[in-house]
Each structure stands twice: as structure tokens, then as C-alpha cells.
Amino acid sequence: MKAFVIRNQGKGIEAWKLVERPDPKPGPGEVLVRVRAASLNYRDLMIASGVYGGPLKDDLVPLADGAGEVAALGDGVTRWKIGDRVAGAYFPTWQGGPMRPEYFERQVGARVTDGWLAESIVLPESGLVRLPDYLSFEEAATLPCAAVTAWVSLFEAAVRPKLGSTIVVLGTGGVSLFAAQLALAEGLRVIATTSSNDKAEKLRKLGVRDIINYRETPEWHEEVLRLTGGEGADHILEVGGAGTLPRSLQAVRFAGTVTLLGFLTGTDLKVDPLPVLFRASRLEGVVVGSVQSFEAMNRGLEATKIRPVVDEVFPFERATEALAKMKAATHFGKIVVRVA
């Protein structure tokens, strides 16, 4: 089969190499999936650039997110049949409950577990979920990381937002856009930040009414406070890290929640604890979610018929161009590779 593998980690886009590999075969309790589409996350750029923690096995296949059709079953598999449309969980061994270190070590497309940027992939039967019927493979391939992260952050949080609550999403990457769509479908108010008027117009088409251009308004937390009558937002989904977390902590209301999801602007940060203490707010970390969370989210998608925002779909042979677009950070929504 054809697959992209990571060689010369640290070379960025040049780290991905297209190779021929033996066709994988499912073992007991495993499923062989014919990959139809895969999507990128910022993590994949970090791995290729050599700045994601932990060693990689030789010739690791990248990408945590993908969707396809069940092509073969290992001994003992009872949950799936040939032809089923499935996606893979980001952490295929995390069925439910709290995160544990052993789940993290088995994340797909990193460390020791091959990912979706290949014509076929083998995963445990319990690490797959059924696709919502109304989604294409390209749309469904965007779900495992960004959509599940947004779902868990909002609806499995320590304090779930109530009808009318104000949610702030930062930027227009996959997690933020999924969060905005899910929140709007739940009747929540969404405030979004973005870097350009063009992206602001696309946010309006999704139904977001309150938008802050953070290039024009670098002290965007002050605008959040103004838009909320000085109260602050109930819940902020923080994807920036060092460059944005201090402002998020100032923009959240008393007893509100800031959920830390990423570090797109870096990790070199000393957090001032005073805003957390004096506002009695919560700072939570979310790292995607379990298989059960994925299944719960899919039920929510079936009910709302939300369609993922796909920026561009690249053919398999041009997958490195998809990674280059991720690096350029010009995308609005998810970047997808059509495999077959």
C-alpha cells in the first residue's frame, strides 16, 4: 500500500515521505479500515517539526484523524462488519472515564501508533466509531480531534454552559469553529476572535454575531468585557497558550471557566494566579476525549446536522501541500486529504 511516513523528524514539511509498505493485516480484536480521507491538526505540524514531546517509532504514519470503510476483520471481532463507515478515536484505548498515561501513549499518528495518512490502517475494534450518516468521508475525517475536543470542553465540562451563556472562541481553527457551531446549536451566545475581516465575514455566515479582530484590537479581552456589560464571558475556549491565556483569564466572568486546549502561540508562559483566585474562576485542561465522548458527540451531530467547516481538500499525492497550508495558518476550518 501507499503511505506517508515521517523521516528526518524536525525537517517540517520535508519530514513526510511517500513510500510503499506491505498491506497491514488485522490481528485478533482488530479491524482493517480502507482509508477514504484524513485531516490535519496542528499537532501534526509539531511532530514533523520535531517539537512534539516523545520519541517516534521508525517510519511512523502521521495523522490522528481519518475515516473510511471496514475492509477486513480480525479474529473475535463482533462489533463491525465489512463495509461499515467508521472513524477512529484519537485515543483508541480510552473508552471512558478520566484520562490515564497509558491512553496518551497510544494516541494515533504519534509515538508508536500509525496514523491515517495511508491507504489502510489497523485499529482495535473498540477504537472505532460509526459515522453520522449525513456526513461525507471528508467531513467525517475532521471529527476525531477538533470536534471531540470542542464537545468535551463545552458539554462534559465541570460546569456545563446553560442556555444563554456566553462562550468565547479564539481564532478560526478546527476546534474553535466546531465549538462555535455546537454552542450556537445549543442556544449559547458566541464571541469569536479572528485576524482578518475576510474570516470575520465567514464567521457571520456561520451565525456568529459578536466578532473581534484581534489585530485591530490587540487588547481583545477588554472588548469581551464591553460586550458582556463588564461581566466577562461564562466560558472561554483557550487555544493560544502563552500569547492569549493572560487575556482569557481577564475576560472570564467571576466563577467562569477557561478551558486550555492548545498552545498555538507558544508555551513559554508564567501564569499569574491572581485572576483565577480573585475571580474564583476555573482553569481546566482538556486533551480531546474518550471513545464514549466521541459517540455522544456523534449523537449530538445527528440531532443538529452540523456540517464541519472544511477549508480545502487535497489529493493524497499532494499531502505535503496540506501540511504547508497548515504551517501558513491561512486556513478557515479543517484541512483534509482525500486518500481514496
Image: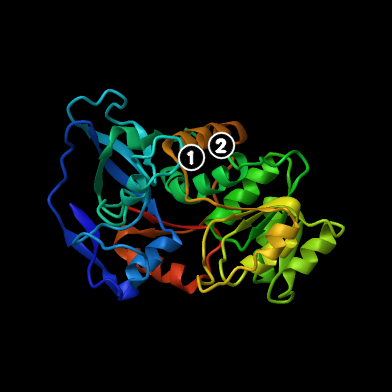
Q: How is the image coloured?
A: rainbow
Asked whether 201 or 80 is in front, the reply is 80
Whether residue 165 is visible here, answered yes or no, is yes
Cβ atoms under marks 1 and 2 closer than 8 Å: yes
Mark 1: amino acid: Leu
Whether residue 200 is visible here, answered yes or no, is no
Name the residue: 39% across, 60% down.
Answer: 314
Name the residue: 31% across, 57% down.
Answer: 110
Asked whether 237 or 77 is in front, the reply is 237
* Residue 311 vertical placement versus 160 (above, below): below
Q: On the image, numbered disc 2 is attached to which residue?
A: 301
Asked whether 295 or 121 is in front, the reply is 295
The quadrant in which residue 76 appears is top left
* Residue 216 vertical placement versus 166 (above, below): below
* Residue 28 vertical placement versus 109 (above, below): above
- Secondary element type, mark 1: loop
> Between marks 1 and 2, how big is the CA–CA gap?
10 Å
Where is residue 4? Give x, y as percent.
25, 60
Name the residue: 52% across, 48% down.
Answer: 149
Q: On the image, numbered disc 1 is attached to which residue?
A: 135
Where is residue 176? Give x, y as percent.
59, 56
